[in-house]
Amino acid sequence: TGQNLKSVNQTFIDQVENITVERSAGEGLGLLLEEMWQSEETQIRGLVLVSGVIDDSPAARSGAFKRGDTLISANGKDLEGLAFDTLVEELGSLSDDLLINFQVQRIVQRATVDVTVIDYDGTPRSRFLVPAGGNLRTAFLFNGFQNSDIYDSETMRFDALGNSGTNCGGDGTCGTCLISIIQGADLISPPGRVEKLALAKQQRPPRWRWSCNVYVGLGNRGGNITVGLRPQALFEDERQKTVGI
C-alpha cells in the first residue's frame, strides 16, 4: 500500500491509499459494499462505502481495506461518486483482471507532532504541538514568536542581495528564516525548488532549512522534532552570504 495526504482540518484528514489486490482466475474480489442514503424519502442516493471483506478473499488477503473506505478508482477506472449499481457494474467489468490497483479514500485521525524550540545559543525557548501537515513558521507565530525570533536582521536575503533587515513575509524567497533541524528530520517535508536551489548555492549546512517551507508530520506521522532558531547568528560568514538567484 501507499498513501497521499489530501485536504486537512484540525482533527481528521482525508487520506488516499493505494491498494493492490491479487486474485486467481474466476475468483471474486470479496469486497462488501454499502450505500449510504442521503434521504430515503426523496430517494436521493449517497456515498458507497466498504462495509467489510469476505474472509480469505482477495480483498481480505490484501489486508489493506478498512470499513468506511470509499473507492476512488480501480485499474484506472474512475469510481468516485458512482451509485451502488453503477459501481458494482464497473467492478464487474474487471472480472478478467487478476491484478487490480485500487485507490480508496478514508478519514483518519490527524497525527500530532511535538516541537521543541531552542535558540541559536542553546537556550530553551518553547515546546508546542503541531498537527501533521502544519507549517512550522505559522506554528511559530501562532505560539507567540515574534518576527525578530524567526528572522535574523543581519542575514542577507537570497532574493535581494545586499539587503538585510527585511524578509519576504513567508513567501519562501528570502531565506532569512533559517532553522537547524536537530531532531526529527524524517518527519518534515523536503525543500521545494527555490529553497533547495538557495541552500545548495549558498552551501548551507545539510540540516538547515527555511521554516516557511517546513511542514511537519510527513505522511501523517506523529513524533518529536527539535529545531534551533536562527543558527546563522553564530557564524558571521553564514549571515553575509552574497550568492543569490
Image (cartoon, rainbow, N blue to C red):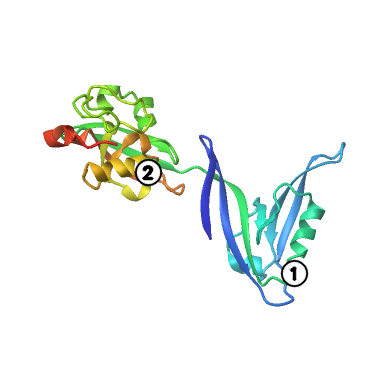
Question: What amino acid type should be assigned to the residue bearing mark 1?
Answer: Ser
- Judge left or right: residue 10 versus residue 49: left
User: What kind of element bears circle 2?
Assistant: helix
Quadrant the C terminus occupies: top left
Task: Please indicate, yes or no, whether residue 131 appears anywhere in the rendered image.
Answer: yes
The Cα–Cα distance between marks 1 and 2, rounded to whole angstroms, is: 44 Å
Q: Position of residue 45 (x, y in %)?
A: 80, 43
Residue designated by label 1: 95
Q: Nearer the viewer, residue 170 or 1?
A: 170
Q: Nearer the viewer, residue 169 or 69?
A: 169
Q: From the viewer's perspective, is residue 120 above or below residue 56?
A: above
Question: What amino acid type should be assigned to the residue bearing mark 2?
Answer: Arg
- Judge left or right: residue 217 versus residue 43: left
Residue pictured at 25% horizontal, 26% vertical: 149
Residue pictured at 20% horizontal, 36% vertical: 231
Q: Nearer the viewer, residue 219 or 154?
A: 154
Query: Residue 137's image quarter?
Result: top left
Label 1 or label 2, whichever comes before in sequence order:
1
Residue pictured at 27% horizontal, 28% vertical: 160
Q: Position of residue 102 (x, y in %)?
A: 63, 59
Q: Nearer the viewer, residue 239 or 225?
A: 239
- Residue lying farthest bottom? 25
**Count of marks, rendered view:** 2
Residue 193, numbered circle: 2
Task: Please indicate, yes or no, whether residue 208 appears anywhere in the rendered image.
Answer: no
Q: Position of residue 103 (x, y in %)?
A: 61, 55
- Judge left or right: residue 183 versus residue 31: left
Q: Residues within 10 Å of mark 2 (few under 14, many from 20)?
A: few
User: What kind of element bears circle 1?
Assistant: loop
